[in-house]
Amino acid sequence: MPWTRARPRATRTAATSAAEVDDIRTEWEDRYGPLPPRAQALIEIARLRVEALRVGLTEVVRLRHEVKLAPVGLSASQEVRLQRLAPERSPATALAGFIRTMWPSDTQE
């Protein structure tokens, strides 16, 4: 089945943990083959949403070329760290990594 027909099912899948995101990625790769860039972006966004929910962020909104996370207040050092992370990876991956760094999980998934 081509990715274009798989997309409606893919966008309805909601993950609530990193393990669930990994399971979805594995299922998609098994079913449809290598992930195209848009599918990879969906996985990265799912990881960001899981991390945001874990630390109590209820709003993850893209506004043009920026992402709004709320409610959150960053110290000056956290803002600098986020700016350094963003150019290295996709914005969703950078933000998820930033959340994991600033608010580490009590358990390892």
Image: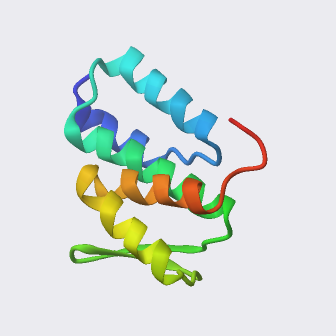
The residue closer to the viewer here, 51 or 108, is 108
Across and down, in percent, residue 11 comes to: 41, 48
The residue closer to the viewer here, 33 or 104, is 104
Which residue is located at x 23 percent, y 58 percent? 87
Which residue is located at x 71 percent, y 50 percent? 105
Across and down, in percent, residue 80 comes to: 38, 73
The C terminus, quarter of image: top right
Q: Look at the picture and state if 20 lies above or below 32.
A: below
Q: Look at the picture and state if 60 lies above or below 106.
A: below
Q: Look at the picture and state if 22 lies above or below 62.
A: above
Which residue is located at x 61 percent, y 72 percent? 57
Across and down, in percent, residue 67 comes to: 36, 73
Q: Look at the picture and state if 82 lies above or below 71.
A: above
Q: Residue furthest front?
A: 77
Q: In this figure, which colouring scheme has been used for the structure?
A: rainbow
The residue closer to the viewer here, 6 or 23, is 23
The N terminus, quarter of image: top left
Q: Residue furthest right?
A: 106
Q: For this view, does 30 lie left or right of residue 55?
A: left
- Number of numbered labels in the structure image: 0
Which residue is located at x 49 percent, y 73 percent? 78
Across and down, in percent, residue 84 comes to: 32, 63
